[in-house]
Image (tube, rainbow, N blue to C red):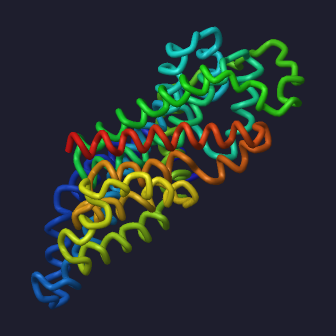
């Protein structure tokens, strides 16, 4: 048992001031390292190295803090409790609640099938279930903290709002299509019985420990993607000419949004790998709507999740699910290109 397991509250008291100090002096440390290397100011290589050395620790610091806080918040939730909260909710009201709960409920692609079955067992409308399945991977703490760290709170808020709009609308549309016949027959043959939740009385210390566990699990898994993504972004930042992407992903290119979505849907990456690349694309002239559409299609329409859902959904519903969400992403992309 390490010191964090034995004294989680003491660990916070020790680590929080250290986190603040590191974050405040980070830019000065990077400038000092760059000056020691002898790299010429303003050169492409210098700017690429500066981008990489600054963004990697900055994003890791922000990610650690936000994942820790979200880990504590998630100790109040569970997939089972989420299912209970959604029972009996009508369409649209249920879509809104499901989308909101998708943000804070622990979720990964491997849990998509058991969650889907549990929701169906509980009599939760299919459209409400899909709102949850869209929101959970798309609007996660990794995406939010990276957007906040790289772009600022306004862009992070835009992304969360757009993600919620897509999740709510997509679930509502799927619910109105009455596609229950495209769910695999064996799913409806499962009898739910009485759903019970074993109450766990978490102490404050337990919730703090949940935060540290979340940091260990999530940051420990995504840091390689983060480094690769920022590395690619650094290359784009240093070597791609200014406004180069405007001719490919600019708002004046009418086909850029649907093409970005078509490219993004079959790709697989998490937020840590794709958002630093998105930042570099924006800096080189790509429009916000097109870039958001690309990012949402990669993160929100996860290929592994879609493949796993094939166990419980027939192909027509898979295509409807992907098509409705992709159309929503395209509309949001065009909307933001018009506004911004």
Q: Residue at x 15, y 77 (%)?
A: 32
Q: Residue at x 44, y 71 (%)?
A: 228
How far across and down, in percent of the image, does residue 125 sit? 66, 18
Residue placed most toward the observer, 20 or 159: 159
Q: Quadrant of residue 106 in the image?
A: top right
How far across and down, in percent of the image, does residue 216 sit? 52, 52
Residue placed most toward the observer, 291 or 104: 291
Q: Is residue 260 above or below residue 32?
A: above
How far across and down, in percent of the image, does residue 84 sit? 65, 16
Q: Is residue 76 above or below residue 273?
A: above
Q: Is 257 left or right of 81, judged from the image as shown?
A: left
Q: Residue at x 58, y 58 (%)?
A: 266
Q: Is 307 left or right of 143, judged from the image as shown?
A: right
Residue placed most toward the observer, 107 or 61: 107
Q: Is residue 301 above or below residue 92?
A: below
How far across and down, in percent of the image, does residue 121 sit? 77, 20
Visible in this render: residue 314?
A: yes
Residue placed most toward the observer, 175 or 274: 175
Q: Residue at x 55, y 47 (%)?
A: 301
Visible in this render: residue 220?
A: no
Quadrant for the C terminus, please.
top left
């Amino acid at each position: 048992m390490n010191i964090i397991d034995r004294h989680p509250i003491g660990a916070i008291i020790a680590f929080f001031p250290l986190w603040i100090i590191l974050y405040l002096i980070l830019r000065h440390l990077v400038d000092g390292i760059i000056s020691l290397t002898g790299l010429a100011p303003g050169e492409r290589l210098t700017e690429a190295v500066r981008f990489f050395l600054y963004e990697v620790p900055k994003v890791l610091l922000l990610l650690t803090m936000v994942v820790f806080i979200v880990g504590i918040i998630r100790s109040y939730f569970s997939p089972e409790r989420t299912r209970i909260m959604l029972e009996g909710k009508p369409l649209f009201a249920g879509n809104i609640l499901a989308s909101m709960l998708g943000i804070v409920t622990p979720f990964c692609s491997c849990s998509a099938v058991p969650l889907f079955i549990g929701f169906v067992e509980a009599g939760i409308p299919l459209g409400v279930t899909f709102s949850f399945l869209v929101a959970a991977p798309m609007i996660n703490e990794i995406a939010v903290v990276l957007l906040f760290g790289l772009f600022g709170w306004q862009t992070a808020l835009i992304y969360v709002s757009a993600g919620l709009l897509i999740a709510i609308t997509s679930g509502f549309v799927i619910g109105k299509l009455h596609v229950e016949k495209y769910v695999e027959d064996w799913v409806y043959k499962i009898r739910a019985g009485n759903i019970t939740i074993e109450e766990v009385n978490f102490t404050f210390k337990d919730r703090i420990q949940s935060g540290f566990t979340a940091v260990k699990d999530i940051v420990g898994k995504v840091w390689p993607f983060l480094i690769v993504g920022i590395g690619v972004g650094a290359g784009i930042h240093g070597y791609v000419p200014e406004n180069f992407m405007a001719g490919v992903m600019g708002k004046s290119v009418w086909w850029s949004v649907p093409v970005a979505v078509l490219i993004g849907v079959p790709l697989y990456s998490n937020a840590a790998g794709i958002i630093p690349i998105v930042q570099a694309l924006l800096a080189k002239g790509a429009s916000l709507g097109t870039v958001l559409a690309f990012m949402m299609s990669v993160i929100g329409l996860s290929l592994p999740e879609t493949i796993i859902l094939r166990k419980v959904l027939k192909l027509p519903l898979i295509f409807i699910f992907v098509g409705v969400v992709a159309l929503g992403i395209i509309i949001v992309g065009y909307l933001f290109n018009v506004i911004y």
